[in-house]
Amino acid sequence: MQRWRGLEDIPRDWGRSVVTIGSYDGVHRGHQLIIRHAVDRARQLGVPVVVVTFDPHPSEVVRPGSHPPLLAPHHRRAELMADLGVDAVLILPFTTEFSKLSPADFVVKVLADRLHARAVVEGPNFRFGHRAAGNVEFLTEQGKEHDFEVEVVDLHLTGAAGGGQPFSSTLTRRLVAEGDVAGAAEILGRPHRVEGVVVRGAQRGRELGFPTANVETLPHTAIPADGVYAGWLHVDGEAMPAAISVGTNPQFDGTERTVEAYAIDRVGLDLYGLHVAVDFLAYVRGQARFDTLDALLEQMAEDVKRCRELVAEADAGAR
């Protein structure tokens, strides 16, 4: 899959293509519906499909300090899009100048002149251009003028997490923030993931017999609510069952919020300096302060046992 940053990276000989545009944070099941539709249409037309997205998130430029927590960094989104059959991802630097581009100018500069759109696929609430003045109706009219068709994919969510609401990154972020990682996974179509480099912490886990990977998460990462979770620690392509702790470590009067993952039944791991990923499968319990160290150790052993069981059940169900 090709990856371009800015319009100038698009090959000069780029031909017609099917295009879809959006932040696509998380590449959740709603996004997947749109992208799959775009891929299917591109295959019918015999042209490539391009996803156009933005960096930083537009809200950070329009309203500085309002950057939402991110469900997935750009490289992860690109991997997920490639798995869906996307041929190219165009990341447009979202600057103050770019934010002032009118919807009509956006169509000309991005869709017509550079990507030579044959079709554009979007969700029903798609907005674009200065002050988000452009919508699918305007885009459809522009398509008639610039020789591309517009196809709209309806988005909906059924099940316990969504309650009939549309698929949305906003809903997913709320569920993650509440610690409902199972509900978030229902929308994402996979466990919520955080990534980062393993750094040295207080090393109390090692002293207690449960050495953890202290993950320095990427900026703006959507981190689940404080608590203990079952999940997986991904290292160099290997997924290891893990007990994950998110919080300030109240037992030792901690103040810094951390994400720490204990690789269950693994010994002798040296992960310092490695980029790792942590997938959240299920919430186990909230953070707590215990009366004695022995009580803490007993609870940690129970947590690991429960996490081992939950991951084993999930792995068995996936087979």
Image: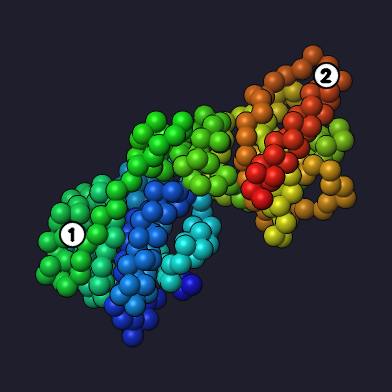
- Label count reads 2
Local crowd size for mark 2, using a 10 Å CA cut-off: few (<14), some (14–19), many (≥20): few
Name which residue lies at 69% across and 60% down.
237
Q: Kindly identify the amino acid type of the residue bearing the numbered disc 1.
A: Leu
> Residue shown at 35%/60% (left/top)?
37
Q: How far apart are marks 1 and 2 (CA)?
A: 62 Å
Q: With respect to residue 173, does 218 lie above or below?
A: below
Residue drawn at point x = 74 percent, y = 35 percent? 309
Q: Is mark 2 on a helix, strand or loop?
A: helix
Which residue occupies the foreground of this view, 139 or 43?
A: 43
Q: What amino acid type is highlighted by mark number 2? A: Ala
- Quadrant hosting residue 208: top right
Residue 183 image offset from top left, x and y in percent: 51, 35
Does 284 sit left or right of 176 as displayed? right
The residue that disc 1 covers is 139
Decide which of tag 1 and tag 2 comes sooner along the chain: 1
Which residue is identified by label 2? 295
Q: Position of residue 127 (x, y in %)?
A: 24, 51
Query: Horizontal and vertical percent for residue 76?
Result: 53, 57
